[in-house]
Structure formats: structure tokens, C-alpha cells
Image (cartoon, rainbow, N blue to C red):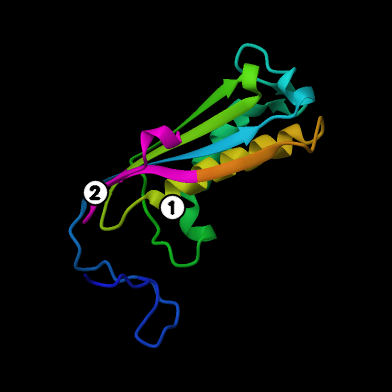
Amino acid sequence: MSQKTFSHLDAKGQPAMVNVGEKPITRRTATAIALISLPPELATLLKDGEIKTKKGPIFQTAVLAGVMGAKRTSDLIPLCHPLALDDCQIEIKPDAEHRNVSIVCRVQTHAKTGVEMEALTGATVAALTLYDMGKAVSQGIVIREIKLLEKTGGKTDYRADPAEY
């Protein structure tokens, strides 16, 4: 059994960008999710799948922010390669009965490296935007979990257990 090593460390153990120069360009996809709990005072404002505030519609703004975040991932994460995204879709699913919101970010590109970080960043920035816009009503918003659901392309594919989402 081979031992896995950290890809972003050089032979001396120092941080280094992974050299992807010899890798083939392939179709890469990734899907990430952010799970959020809304406090009662914010959940009661949910009407027709949206929360409208003086700053504007929270979910619509979060979608735009998430796409912008996914596109800027390499500016935020030091050793990420800059990638041109072919597609980035963010879907926000509110569950008023349980006061939960799920934010799903799906990203696609044709590149030499994967887009997991872009999907995770898109979901995270959308969740943070929801928090920012909703905090005037309540700071009790909880971003419970952010995780990768699946990725395809490259050497290996990954899919989280469907029971986890």
C-alpha cells in the first residue's frame, strides 16, 4: 500500500504549487454544498423561496456572490491554479419548515487540474453572503457544514455517500 503525501509540499517540505504542465486537459466537474440553519426570526421572512431585505433579495445576491467567488478562487487560496470556468451554477434550496437552507455549487471546466476548490469556494461565499445580508435580522445564522459532494475528471473520481446530503 502506497502512502499518500501532500501534493503542495516540495522535497524540502516547503509550500509549492503543483506542476500540472505535463498533465492532459480533461473535462473536470465538482459539486459542493453548504448547509445553513436559519434562526426563527429570519426563517419567518422566507416568502416564495426568497428573503427580501432593504439590501435586496438575499438568495439572488448569494448566487451572484457565489459565482464571483468560484471565479476568484485562485486569488483567495494561495496554491490554487487559476482556472477558466466553463460553467458555474448555484442553487439555493430553502426548507422553511426545518429552518434550513442548502446551497449547492456545481462547477465545470476543461483543464489540467480539478475544480473542487472552486465548487467549495462558490458554496462558501454564497453562504457567507447569506449571513452578511441576514445578520441585520439575526446573527444566529449558523453555517453548519461545507463539503465536497462529488468530483469527476483527472486520475480519480469521488462521490460522497448520498446519505450524507
Give, as a single range, the part of the protein colored magenta.
147-165
Q: Secondary structure at mark 2?
A: loop
Chain-order first, disc 2 or disc 1:
1
The residue positioned 72% from the left and 39% from the top of the image is 132
Q: Name the one closer to the observer, 110 or 48.
A: 48
Q: Calculate the distance from the C-alpha at mark 2 to the C-alpha at mark 1.
A: 14 Å
Amino acid of disc 1: Met
Residue 117 x, y percent position in the rendering: 43, 52
Q: Is residue 115 left or right of residue 154?
A: right
User: How many other residues sit within 10 Å of disc 1, few (<14), some (14-19) or many (≥20)?
Assistant: many
Residue 1 sits in which quadrant? bottom left
Residue at 19 percent of width and 68 percent of height? 22
Residue 151 is inside the magenta segment? yes
In the image, is residue 20 part of the stretch drawn in magenta?
A: no
Q: Quadrant of the C terminus?
A: top left
Q: Amino acid at mark 2?
A: Gly
Residue 117's tag is 1
